[in-house]
Amino acid sequence: MAFGSGITVGGRNRGGHRAFTLIELLVVVAIISLLISILLPSLSNARQQARATKCLSNLRVLGQGLTMYVTDYRDVLVPGRLPKIDDCNAYADILGGRKYRPTFVAMMSRAVGAPPFEDPKACKTETDKFGEAGDRQNYSYEVYVCPSVSEWTDERNGSYGYNYQFLGNSRLFDDEDIHSYKNWPLQITRIRYPARTVAAGDCMGTAAAYPPAERQPYEISERPPFEEDLKVAECYGNEGFNLDPPRVDPVNGEIAGYKHSPPVRSAADPRHRDAANILWVDSHAGALTLRELGYQFEQNGSVGLDGDNTLWSGNGLDVPWTPEFTPSW
């Protein structure tokens, strides 16, 4: 018996054509669900690969900027970040305006051709139109931020770090001597193996000094203007612009969190399928695991201090940077 058009009895409609039964519909739904469950990981992997590819593209653009910067400044490599002297020094004229203590990526911005900040400020005590203090502004152009960690926009807690120890440490030995740079200026001609020397790359910040279970989520600079830096060493991205090499000497040498007690190191970040994207001094880029880069790990999973610096020192030597280090041929 049928109650209205299209209602079936015994699996057939009025026209005599067989209709889907409830069981058949459930089977179709189950098959579709199974296909979706199979395809979703592939789609996720494709997205991850797309982000890794875009990150490599960013680093290649930064590599071109590094090459042009070196050419413009008589072979001198870019510094990691200009030192803190007072609330308006040191500064540099970057693409977009005068900027207080720019990092290496902002220093290269004229060569890169992309303004790092929409409203750069020349003093720490100034705030931009977004309410960000002059020493903790957020990057406004995507080339300066890895797409896999797109929220890491704070210039201090950035996603890309620089091999500052061996290529351009502009921290001061003596705060009273504003020219007592620890390892800058350094000419690129002092780098013996530019194709085998890390320039920059994905950096996890000082979270590297802690076991993975103790590392905390990234924290952007959400704090009142002019407040002293909230330095949370366990957080991903903390001091992210400073990329420490595998072997560091925290007593006689240098380390990203050198003012932290105890000092804490940074390291490359294997955010792309267990590999970190790396820019080399000769401007090519590629992905390597942390072990391939020379890092070693403690039993608790933290990044140790006694890795291999062969790919970092510039001359192929496995030594930590200390004030006595001199690039040699």
Image (spheres, rainbow, N blue to C red):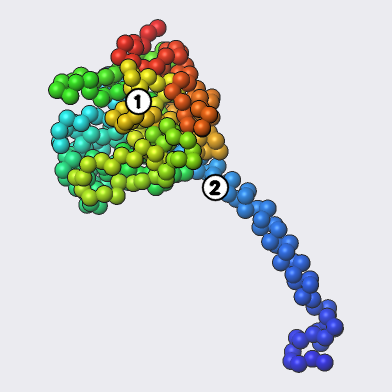
Report the residue at 30% width, 46% height from top.
221
User: Quarter holding the C terminus?
Assistant: top left
Q: Amino acid at mark 1?
A: Ile
**Residue 270 position within the rendered picture, expressed as x and y whole percent measured from the top left:** 50, 35
Q: Amino acid at mark 2?
A: Arg
Report the residue at 76% width, 92% height from top.
3
Q: Is residue 12 left or right of residue 116?
A: right
User: Vertically, is 25 above or below 126?
Assistant: below
Name the quadrant containing residue 76. top left
Is 224 in front, or is 194? 224
Residue that mark 2 sits on: 47
Q: Earlier in the sequence, mark 1 or mark 2?
A: 2
User: Vertically, is 308 above or below 31?
Assistant: above
Mark yes or no: residue 111 visible: no
Q: Mark 2 packing: few (<14 Cα in 10 Å), some, or many (20+)?
A: few
Residue that mark 1 sits on: 255
Is 260 in front, or is 226? 260
Q: Is residue 282 left or right of residue 47?
A: left
